[in-house]
Amino acid sequence: MTRITVVGSFAVGLTIRTETMPVFGQTIIGSDFDFGPGGKGSNQAVGAARLGAEATLVTCLGRDQLAGVADQLYAAEGVKTDFIERTGDRATGAGIIVLNADGENFIILDMGANELMDAAIVDRASERIATSDIVMSVLEIPVAAAHRAMEAGKAAGARTILNPAPAMALPDTIFAHVDYLTPNESELRILLGLAPDDPTGTQTLAAELRRRGVGTVVATMGENGALVLGDDIDLVVPTPRVDAVDTTGAGDAFNAGLAVALGEGRPLADAVAFGAAAGAHACTRLGVIPSLATGTELETFVADQAGNHAEGPE
């Protein structure tokens, strides 16, 4: 079984809908309140577990009711929690999302206990990292923790994946420890200090990140596929075509699928295709956790896609 350690974030999203947005001092009636688990690190760990990996999450939770949402999720999904820290100093991460009738939203985030993640917490998981096939991290935690995760994973002989979301300019020192960097097109530009809509080509930017030390750049481009640029690979892996219902979980599903496939020893192009299938499948369901496929579901999805492609348009 592939062993994957994710050093990342957990947060609970609380959503409410309203016809119009309130102004300061105004109270209005909303509807359809909902809440559920999130955080990119958590999502990717759950995604990997559903695809058959032994997934461990390294994160930090508060000692509060919202931490119970995480506990219930990981118990149900089989995510290992041996290295989850608990703190009474900060609340569990949370986000408040208000949606209006036009689908517009505003979001207020408190990353809470996630902000306490540091190199020392990562080091306490060193025994698990040392026996991992893949070590992953994201940027919803302090950069120092993500940096240490990549460094420790690389030193242990694991393959490392950094999903640089939310994107920010990073020191070049981190890139030497990153085997696979998985930005989307906007994140790719922000990593290099550019505007998200900078017209510079994706290939050129990926090459610059490789020059700075990244092993392989896997840049996701939505329906246009994923650019894969490494020492002996330069190609675009297509994305399956679907009728998208909700794209929120696509990036996390892609990273989970990529990690599992690499851990299983699949060639890189095949691993990226597996990740792309996981991401496309996620777009067909509402909500992040419900959109993360099991291995059986993804096999069926891939087979259906192949059948549809073979039949061609009517």
Image (spheres, rainbow, N blue to C red):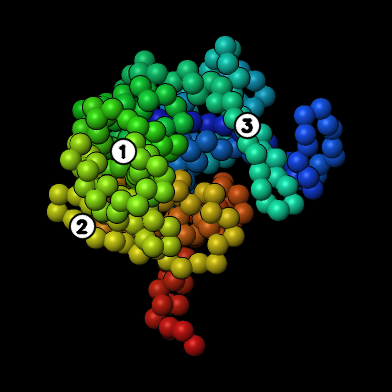
Look at the image and tell me whether residue 138 can be seen: no
Verify CB contact (< 8 Å) between mark 2 and mark 3: no
Give the residue type that dot 3 points to. Answer: Ile
The residues tagged by marks 2 and 3 sit, at their Cα atoms, a distance apart of 39 Å
Q: Which residue is mark 2?
A: 234
Percent x, y of residue 214 = 22, 39
Q: Secondary structure at mark 1?
A: loop
Please name the residue shown 57% across and 11% down the image. Answer: 89
Q: Amino acid at mark 2?
A: Asp
Could you tell which of marks 2 and 3 lies nearer the N-terminus? 3
Residue position for label 1: 192
Placement of 268 over or under 166, stated as above or below: below
Tag of residue 248:
none
Tell me if mark 1 has few (under 14), some (14-19) or many (20+) residues whose alpha carbon lies within 10 angstroms of its own.
Answer: some
In this view, 106 is above or below 101: above
Res. 223 image quadrant: bottom left
Q: Position of residue 69 (x, y in %)?
A: 63, 32
Mark 1 vs 3, N-terminal side: 3
Quadrant for the N terminus in the image: top left
How far is the residue under mark 1 from the one under mark 2?
A: 20 Å
In this rendered view, identify the residue nearer to me: 10 or 26. Answer: 26
Q: Tag 1: residue type? A: Leu
**Residue at left 15%, top 49%?**
231
Q: Which residue is more in the foreground, 22 or 50? A: 22
From mark 1 to mark 3, how far is it between C-alphas?
A: 26 Å
Secondary structure type for disc 2: strand
Q: Residues within 10 Å of mark 2 (few under 14, many from 20)?
A: some
Residue occupied by mark 3 = 108
The residue lying at 46 percent from left, 72 percent from top is 304
Label 3 environment density (alpha carbons within 10 Å; few <14, some 14–19, many ≥20)? few
Tell me whether circle 1 and circle 3 mark residues in contact (CB < 8 Å).
Answer: no
